Image (spheres, rainbow, N blue to C red):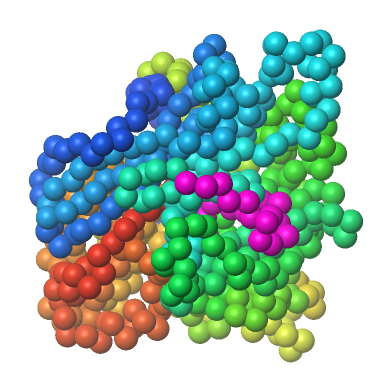
Amino acid sequence: MPATTEQYTHNLSSRERCPKADDLESLEHLVQSGEETPEPIPTTIKGSIPTWINGSFLRNGPGKFEFGEDKYIHWFDGMAMMHRFHIRDGSVTYSSRFLRSDSYVQNLEKNRIVVSEFGTVASPDPCQSIFARFFSYFQTPQPTDNANVNFVKYKGDYYVSTETNYMRRVDPQSLETKEKVDWSQYIAVNSATAHPHYDREGATYNMGNSYGRNGFFYNIIRVPPPEDKSAVEDSADLRGAEVICSIPADEPRKPSYYHSFVMSENYIVFIEQPIKLNLLKFMLYKIQGKSFHNILSWEPQYGTVFHLVHRRTGKKSPVKYRAAPMFTLHQINAYEDNGFLVMDMCCGDDGVVIGEFTLENLRRESGQAMDEFYNSLCRNLPRRYVLPLNVDENTPLDENLITLHDCKATAMKTNPEEVKAEKCSRVSAACLPARVAENTYWWETLIRCGVILACTRLSLSLLLRLELQRKMMEWFCQSLSLLERRKALFYSFWMPGPSLSWAELRSLSTSHVAPMEYLTRWADQHPAILSTGCHYL
């Protein structure tokens, strides 16, 4: 690509960089209430699944969108339904259950929406007196335990989680709902994300908010690995959880909304993005009859701040890394390379998009109506940021500090305690087959080094994903020379556990084992239980 063309593309917004849709099909059938299937049923398989893939693929997401005459407004509001695809010896069974959360049970008993969700406000009980209904608007809204975002794991136990202080422990085999767990009973946080990270020692890291007399803080949480005795106790156990670092909000009266965070081998990065929560509106939103998403606002004037914390010591870097305003829900990958922290994430230029995923919009008719909605959205695309880790008083000002080979991202020290990071928007998939490149986010393509890292963010079915991976591995093995294959490792999204570090990838690349042989051996040694989130934006 010529330099002028590349610079022009780099400066385009994520909305401008995406092709316009034409004659899209309606999504209405995908956002309708479903029926649970508690007993496993067989599935029809197209193609074949390798016999060495054995385990359970667990997913969670909205599955019921109305109670009686009351209907939810936003996609994120639907009652949680858990899904399990059990894979064994080339066959797959499917089962599902609604999460028996307090929200679900109360709504079902009253046959109406009793508990408010992200985009829907519950109406007062019509059976109450006019005075009781009036004063109900002044009661503190109770956070929902409708954990419809993700399966997570703490100390060996499986939970389903949302973005409040509540989780639900579940049985990953039967999908039975167990006890409700309140984060605030273990550590001083008011909520936690549904997307934790795991280290190689078995510890889990997450982030949660706290606010009080001293201000608003973003807290990094560490839950220790499971103990031997906890394996035999059938109860939730978050003992030993601790806050290892508290990050004060850059704007104390307008803290940021966040959905996840970044973790590498040694660092955690909290992304303080300009989707702001107005604390005054937060205190009054029930009185005003507004849902939670209505108190969030996109305020690009605040820009984006990357807060860097050493995850082993909990020490926050004195350097504040600033970037242009952007919006992100999910990160793709993060790794350290020669004194730099490389972060790849799905980003957009307009945080208003969160409020656009109403059921009314998603149920638009095929053709012009759906095209207009889709084309109006800000699309999230792969974007790379690189943070220099070794910044001190001797670091020169106003010079690009990024020296990684073939890296277009830049970072400049603008004053003694600030670095301005500039994105690289071009994440190429040119070396991959066209069909795969169109449907996959590829964040690092290093054919010359014999290493390919890949990640998909598509809402494809499990079997389609497995078929995609099979074709990818076939292409990978056929397209490289024997010498390159002996140096190569294909590390794909379905493998359980934390990402491999670059050092581990390089050590594996010295092995004289072909990729398919290595993967087969690896899978035999690591039977997988997989989980993923439900929101693919």
Res 379 visible: no
In which quadrant is the N terminus drawn? bottom left
Q: In this view, does 215 lie to the left or right of 367?
A: right
Q: Is residue 57 left or right of residue 80?
A: left
Q: Is residue 243 left or right of residue 113?
A: right
Q: In which quarter of the image is residue 367?
A: top left
Which residue is found at the position 67% from the left and 25% from the top?
121
Q: Residue furthest bottom?
A: 394
User: Considering only vertical position in the picture, is 146 above or below 254?
Assistant: above
Which residue is found at the position 70% from the left and 78% from the top?
315
Which residue is found at the position 79% from the left and 23% from the top?
136
The span shown in magenta is 178-198
The x and y percentages for residue 175 are: 37, 44
Res 393 visible: yes
In the depicted view, which residue is nearer to us: 67 or 482? 67
Q: Quadrant of residue 205?
A: bottom right
Q: Quadrant of residue 233?
A: bottom left
The x and y percentages for residue 109 are: 54, 21
The x and y percentages for residue 46 are: 12, 41
The x and y percentages for residue 127 are: 70, 11
State how many labels appear.
0
In the depicted view, which residue is nearer to us: 154 or 322? 154
Which residue is found at the position 67% from the left and 48% from the top?
257
Is 225 part of what is drawn in magenta? no
Q: In this view, does 8 lie to the left or right of 157?
A: right
